[in-house]
Image (cartoon, helix red, strand yellow):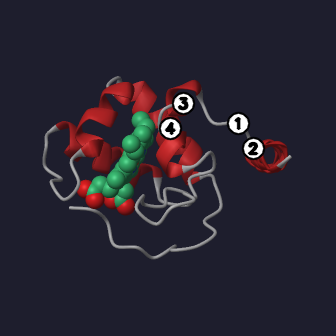
Amino acid sequence: MKFLSLVVIVFSSISALGAPPPQAATCIACHGADGNPAVATYPVLAGKSEEFIISQLEKFEKGEIKSVTVMNSMVAAVKDPAAKKAVAKFYASQKCKARCNEAPKK
Ligand code: HEC
């Protein structure tokens, strides 16, 4: 039952603001379906600008962000610039619910 209601919540929030693009399939696990992660370990992506998200992804690719290294391999899922743009555009269009003024990772 708990799982079912979670599914309902996830799907109702997705249908409210559009479904995540297929390229975001891996990102969702950590950053959340709408860019508002359940756990504070992961940065919020909801409402961050498209330019910021793309530029951070490029920095992960080049290994320029070194605080937590997990993203350096995650970024392989959005190697293609069009994939970066698709996920960035999606997360930028989502509404930030908490931790909206977090400092960028570096
Ligand atoms: C296994 C968990 C995990 C997955 C999957 C994951 N991320 Fe991350 N992401 C993180 C963590 C942890 C950080 C913080 C990195 C740091 O502090 O160096 C991060 C940071 C980021 C940042 C920088 C945010 C900021 O405020 O500076 C962006 C952008 C990002 N991820 C996008 C993505 C995208 C797009 C995907 C899917 C292709 C993805 N992530 C998949 C864990 C994950």
Can you give x and y, in whole percent of width and height, for residue 29 in the image? Answer: 52, 41
- Which residue position is annotated with label 1? 19
Foreground residue among 12 and 50: 12
Between disc 1 and disc 3, the foreground one is 3
Give the class, few, some or many, for how many residues have Cα within 10 Å of label 1's Cα (few <14, many ≥20). some
Front-most of residues 28 and 17: 28
Residue 52 at x, y percent in the picture: 37, 55
Q: Of the residues shown, which amino acid type is indicated by label 2?
A: Ile
**Cα–Cα gap, marks 1 and 4:** 11 Å
Label 3 environment density (alpha carbons within 10 Å; few <14, some 14–19, many ≥20)? few
Regarding mark 1 in the picture, which secondary structure is present there? loop
Please name the amino acid that badge 4 sits on.
Answer: Val
Q: Earlier in the sequence, mark 3 or mark 2?
A: 2
Badge number at residue 14: 2
Discs 1, 4 touching: Cβ within 8 Å: no
Is ligand 1 less than 8 Å from the beta carbon at label 1? no
- 2 and 1 marks in contact (CB < 8 Å): yes
The amino acid sitting under disc 1 is Ala
Q: Say whether disc 4 or disc 2 marks the residue closer to the N-terminus.
A: 2
Q: Is residue 87 left or right of residue 41?
A: right
Which of discs 3 and 4 lies nearer the camera? The answer is 3
Query: What label does residue 87 carry, if any?
Result: 4
Q: Is residue 61 above or below residue 39?
A: above
Quadrant of the frame with the C terminus: bottom left
Q: Position of residue 72 (x, y in %)?
A: 23, 40
Question: Looking at the image, is mark 2 or mark 1 earlier in the sequence?
Answer: 2
In the rendered structure, find residue 25 and report the number of the disc placed on it.
3
